[in-house]
Image (cartoon, rainbow, N blue to C red):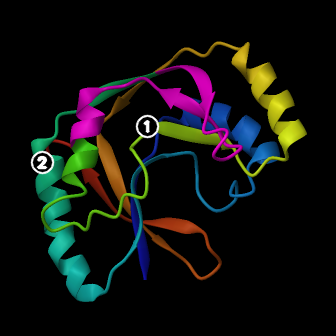
Amino acid sequence: MKYGIAIFPSKSIQDEANSYRKRYDPHYSLIPPHITMKEAFEADDDTLNEIVPELKRIAKETKPFTINIHKVSTFAPVTNTIYFKVEPLQELYDLHQKLHEGKFDNNMTHSFVPHITIAQQLLDDEYSDVFGTLQMSSFDFEDEIDRYQLLYQLENGSWTVYETFVFGEG
């Protein structure tokens, strides 16, 4: 079965992201707005029994932190993906690193760029229009992050929470 690890931001950030995703993200119905902490990976029950205690340990050792979002950015020219840019934060990078070492496979396919996707798989002209408009907008989100979720993928491609791990708890 496929699993992944993500952070879900507050409802206000999700609502703002979804206002764009409804129109510009074909994955809108498959998963709520999120920061991907570990890309999809295959795991069986034995693997899960090993990593869940590790996820609990990491969460217990992690203090809540605050993220900020002030603008959009893009992965162009690699892909026509537009996202809310999460301002660089050492705690986020440290957490990401912990989820890719030890008992976890290092399944990174590219560098970690903390973001919340709001548009993807756009045609070139549509991408230019949407990004040009959003680039002129400013956003002012601050969000306290105090947990992450282990997710699994259902047969229809959607993702659902398997377990939530709250920071500082064990």
Mark drawn on residue 134: none
Q: In the image, what residue type sits under mark 1? A: Pro
Please tell me in which quadrant of the rendered image residue 48 appears: bottom left
For residue 59, above or below residue 142: below
Q: In the image, what residue type sits under mark 2? A: Lys
Is residue 51 rendered magenta in the image? no
**Residue 77 or residue 62, whichever sits in front:** 77
Residue 56: image location, x then y, percent: 16, 58
Residue shown at the point (41%, 52%) measured from the top left: 6
Residue shown at the point (70%, 54%) measured from the top left: 28
Q: Find the magenta span and give its range.
A: 69-94
Residue shown at the point (66%, 31%) measured from the top left: 16
Residue 119: image location, x then y, percent: 71, 42
Q: Tell us which disc is closer to us: 2 or 1.
A: 1
Residue shown at the point (62%, 73%) measured from the top left: 157
Answer with left or right where residue 133 lies relative to residue 68: right
Residue 41: image location, x then y, percent: 39, 72
Answer with left or right where residue 40 lies relative to residue 169: right
Residue 160: image location, x then y, percent: 50, 66
Is residue 85 rendered magenta in the image? yes
Look at mark 1 in the image and give the residue it sits on: 114
Look at mark 2 in the image and give the residue it sits on: 60
Marks 2 and 1 sit apart, C-alpha to C-alpha, by 22 Å
